[in-house]
Image: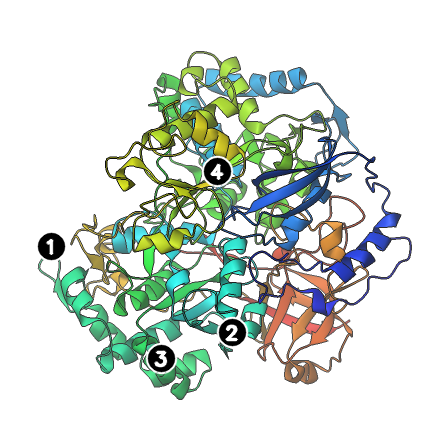
């Protein structure tokens, strides 16, 4: 940065009280002036020519939040600004820091300009040689053809970070047609939520939360204001809460977590709990609800199973949830576990019970890591006790977007043989009873005890070498993998470790879609149209997959019959139109959550109703059964509008063994017959996985935290966002951790002093920031720093928290969970 000093900007954190229609970003206008001056030193600073200014609406594809954005263009060939689209119902003109900085990814110097092949040692950033697309596809096709000829299609694996996109389905279709069971998504809290819903509700779908209608929100660790769920939805919602625009009084927000995060600071009450004990508190609250008979007894009696003692198929009597919770989770016991006062537990229970529209939400920060399954079940049970699983309740499973079925797969004999092989994470001697998206277990198996090797690994829109918690698991596995192929748009850590790089268009250059909003209780679909033609010699990964399918021949290609990825998306939108469901939201006055109680019936408020919502009237072609095969709805989606459907709730006639919500999850018992006869294996419970390391050597706990102003997933922090980080978070190259003054005093460490943070996984140099908002005995480290790739504006700034975090494998699901890591902090 040419010696320039990053100024302290504590005030530029996202101000959650901003309302829809304003620019919700940590780059206010005064700071924008600062950043503009600072940016004159960037070697790659774009200098657009003068010309006609035009605007183009689209959907932001930088995260799965589904926000509408408006791009400003010069002569339709140079983008100069991104702003929130005020006519989009999800974000209503708001935009997060990442979205506001999106053009810095478009014009970033660390973009990969063309296909690359590693000619030196793997990991040598200077060893790549440019090759043509024909050469790149031919080389990859040679490897893939060889595996099939050898009868080893299961030796192929792929990892994608596109969870809420049709690319996920295309990858799944490709891998299955090829013959590999080894398809994975980057980890997310949705992984364990799906398992919890499968166990208790019989539906392997992630859960959604009707926060828009809440009168009381009890949040266990979910950082609602810094990236949880859909950021645009949460920003707009919180603004309406705080400014009286939600149609009713603002709900009381209670935040339970060990650190005073932005959400905790904006909440009505912060509960500084001992880290990792949130589920114990939930069960303690459940105890009080049951003891005082202030739970929803009608729901429990009519729509649940396993609340009282029950008899299994073999005639054994098993404990019910009620007796188990009453015996194990008394307020005094829970107070000791959580470090909270007994009175706090009692008060939370009484507040929760007296609210008609209370809701319990949970998660680790932004929700980028799975949870302990038993703990997910505990939070779900607490929602059940207050009636949130009945019709009209506040909790649901993610509605399905009716995009139609993909072509029926017709695998050949080679593919069938490969698909009969166990997925590698399940190939262990004792696989977990539930089958989840167990990326950590998959990689650990490759590194340590593979039943068969992985010869080709394909990585799409993901950077596991950096983003994966305890990421040394990935780098260890990489040593056993033959060919690593990255489809990254950027020279990130995983691309640097690849043998072949086939660069994707970046998000603002490509056609893609958003399927469902994380945590939202209504169906949502949008198309992310490009604002500009591709600037470099890149290709859409969807088109690359379709090209590979053709090269691999008749055994694969009929299963992926589309010529282009655009054809694939248009076919899906055609199915959406043919379903006759939902509506196109044409402006921000449309609020999908309001139609949860009442179906839309007219177009006067800005939506186009589907035919079953209009009686006998002829539907407009924009929604429902379009006259032109979905062409009109495609045009509206491509113009930055979105489709939504708030159909009646789906939690009826549940496909559980009992046909009801199950406090005692019989599916867990049937999959764990060796777990004893008391039935507690079926029940929600506080069962933390013990961290490694000697308590005397590592007397503290380490927790990582996320910020809205610090990107910690696939995309690295862009310069605007890095500039806006506080000096007590990042100063020069040095990163600060937060500790309570009492903890620092006991260690002989003072404010801003250098220290060494050590865990059983490794150690990193840090500076110390003293904070009353940190729970004593805990070290809090920010996520999103410590990159060793990209360019000088983010490389080597701070340390990678994922390198010192410990992952623990949930024995029920095989998922890699994170709650706390034992640590020590000493003066440097």
- Where is residue 235? Give x, y as percent: 54, 59
Say which label, 4 or 3, has the lower sequence index: 4
How crowded pointer 2 is (Cα within 10 Å; few <14, some 14-19, many 20+) is rated as some
* Residue 632 coordinates in the image, percent (x, y): 44, 28
Query: Real-space Cα distance between discs 2 and 3?
Result: 15 Å
Which residue is tagged 2? 267
Q: Quadrant of residue 534?
A: top right
Disc number for residue 351: 3
Neighbourhood count class around disc 1 (C-alpha, 10 Å): few under 14, some 14–19, many 20 upward? few
How far apart in space, not on screen, are marks 1 and 2 (Cα)?
47 Å
User: Pointer 3: residues within 10 angstroms few (<14), some, or many (20+)?
Assistant: few
Q: Secondary structure at mark 1?
A: loop
Q: Earlier in the sequence, mark 3 or mark 1?
A: 1
Looking at the image, can residue 450 be seen? no
Residue 283 left/right relative to 669: right
C-beta proximity under 8 Å, tags 4 and 3? no
Residue appearing at x 52%, y 49% in the figure: 65
Foreground: disc 1 or disc 4: 4
Residue 308 lies left or right of residue 335; in this view the side is left
Percent position (x, y) of residue 697? 61, 73
Q: Nearer the viewer, mark 4 or mark 2?
A: 2
The answer to which of marks 1 and 2 sits earlier in the sequence is 2
């Amino acid at each position: 940065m040419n010696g320039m000093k990053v100024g302290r900007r504590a005030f530029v954190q996202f101000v959650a009280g901003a309302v829809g229609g304003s620019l919700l970003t940590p780059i206010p206008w005064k700071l924008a002036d600062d950043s503009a001056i600072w940016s004159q030193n960037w070697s790659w600073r774009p200098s657009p020519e003068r010309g006609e200014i035009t605007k183009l609406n689209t959907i932001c594809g930088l995260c799965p939040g589904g926000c509408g954005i408006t791009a400003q263009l010069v002569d339709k060939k140079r983008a100069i600004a991104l702003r929130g689209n005020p006519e989009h119902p999800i974000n209503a003109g708001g935009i997060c820091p990442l979205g506001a900085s999106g053009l810095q990814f478009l014009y970033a110097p660390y973009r990969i300009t063309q296909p690359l092949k590693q000619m030196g040692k793997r990991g040598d950033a200077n060893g790549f040689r440019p090759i043509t697309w024909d050469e790149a596809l031919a080389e990859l096709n040679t490897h893939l053809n060889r595996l099939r000829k050898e009868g080893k299609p299961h030796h192929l694996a792929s990892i994608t970070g596109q969870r809420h996109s049709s690319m996920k389905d295309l990858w799944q279709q490709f891998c299955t047609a090829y013959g590999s069971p080894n398809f994975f998504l980057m980890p997310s809290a949705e992984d364990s939520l799906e398992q919890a819903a499968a166990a208790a509700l019989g539906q392997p779908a992630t859960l959604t939360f009707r926060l828009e209608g809440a009168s009381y929100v009890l949040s266990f660790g979910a950082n609602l204001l810094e990236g949880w769920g859909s950021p645009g939805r949460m920003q707009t919602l919180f603004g309406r809460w705080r400014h009286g625009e939600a149609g009713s009084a603002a709900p009381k927000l209670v935040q339970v977590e060990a650190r005073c995060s932005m959400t905790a600071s904006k909440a009505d009450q912060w509960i500084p709990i001992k880290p990792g004990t949130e589920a114990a508190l939930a069960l303690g609250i459940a105890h009080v609800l049951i003891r005082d008979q202030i739970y929803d007894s009608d729901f429990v009696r009519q729509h649940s199973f396993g609340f009282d003692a029950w008899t299994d198929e073999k005639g054994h009597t098993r404990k019910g949830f009620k007796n188990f919770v009453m015996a194990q989770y008394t307020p005094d016991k829970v107070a000791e576990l959580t470090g909270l006062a007994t009175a706090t537990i009692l008060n939370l229970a009484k507040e929760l019970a007296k609210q008609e529209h209370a809701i319990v939400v949970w998660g680790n920060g932004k929700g980028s890591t799975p949870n302990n399954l038993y703990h997910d079940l505990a939070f779900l049970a607490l929602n059940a006790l207050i009636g949130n699983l009945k019709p009209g309740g506040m909790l649901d499973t993610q509605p399905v977007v009716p995009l139609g079925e993909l072509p029926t797969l017709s695998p050949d004999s080679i593919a069938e043989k490969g698909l009969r092989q166990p997925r590698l994470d399940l190939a262990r001697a004792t696989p977990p009873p539930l089958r989840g998206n167990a990326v950590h277990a998959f990689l650990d198996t490759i590194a340590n005890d593979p039943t068969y090797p992985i010869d080709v690994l394909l990585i799409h829109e993901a950077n596991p070498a950096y983003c994966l918690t305890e990421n040394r698991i990935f780098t260890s596995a990489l040593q056993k993998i033959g060919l690593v192929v990255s489809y990254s748009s950027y020279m990130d850590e995983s691309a640097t470790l690849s043998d072949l790089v086939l660069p994707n268009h970046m998000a603002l250059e490509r056609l893609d879609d958003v399927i469902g909003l994380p945590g939202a209780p209504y169906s949502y679909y949008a198309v992310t149209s490009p604002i500009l033609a591709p600037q470099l010699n890149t290709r859409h990964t969807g088109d690359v997959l379709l090209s590979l399918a053709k090269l691999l021949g008749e055994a694969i290609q009929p299963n992926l019959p589309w010529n282009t990825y655009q054809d694939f998306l248009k076919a899906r939108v055609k199915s959406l139109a043919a379903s006759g469901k939902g509506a196109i939201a044409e402006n921000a006055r449309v609020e999908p959550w309001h139609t949860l109680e009442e179906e839309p019936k007219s177009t006067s408020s800005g939506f186009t109703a589907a035919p079953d919502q209009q009686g006998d009237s002829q539907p407009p072609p924009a929604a429902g059964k379009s006259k032109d095969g979905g062409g009109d709805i495609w045009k509206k989606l491509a113009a930055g509008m979105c489709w939504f459907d708030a159909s009646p709730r789906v939690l009826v006639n549940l496909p559980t063994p009992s046909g009801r919500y199950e406090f005692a999850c019989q599916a867990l018992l049937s999959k764990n017959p060796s777990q004893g006869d008391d039935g507690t294996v079926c029940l929600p419970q506080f069962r933390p996985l013990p961290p490694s390391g000697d308590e005397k050597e590592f007397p503290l706990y380490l927790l990582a935290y996320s910020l809205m102003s610090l990107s910690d997933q696939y995309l690295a922090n862009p310069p605007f966002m890095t500039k806006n980080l506080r000096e007590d978070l990042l100063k020069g190259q040095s990163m600060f951790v937060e500790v309570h003054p009492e903890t620092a005093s006991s260690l002989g460490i003072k404010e801003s002093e250098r220290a060494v943070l050590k865990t059983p996984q490794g150690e990193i140099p840090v500076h110390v920031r003293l904070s009353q908002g940190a729970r004593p005995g805990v070290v809090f480290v920010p996520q999103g720093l410590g990159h060793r790739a990209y360019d000088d504006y983010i490389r080597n700034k701070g340390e990678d928290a994922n390198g010192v975090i410990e992952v623990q494998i949930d024995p029920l699901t095989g998922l890699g969970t994170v709650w706390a890591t034992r640590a020590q902090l000493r003066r440097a």
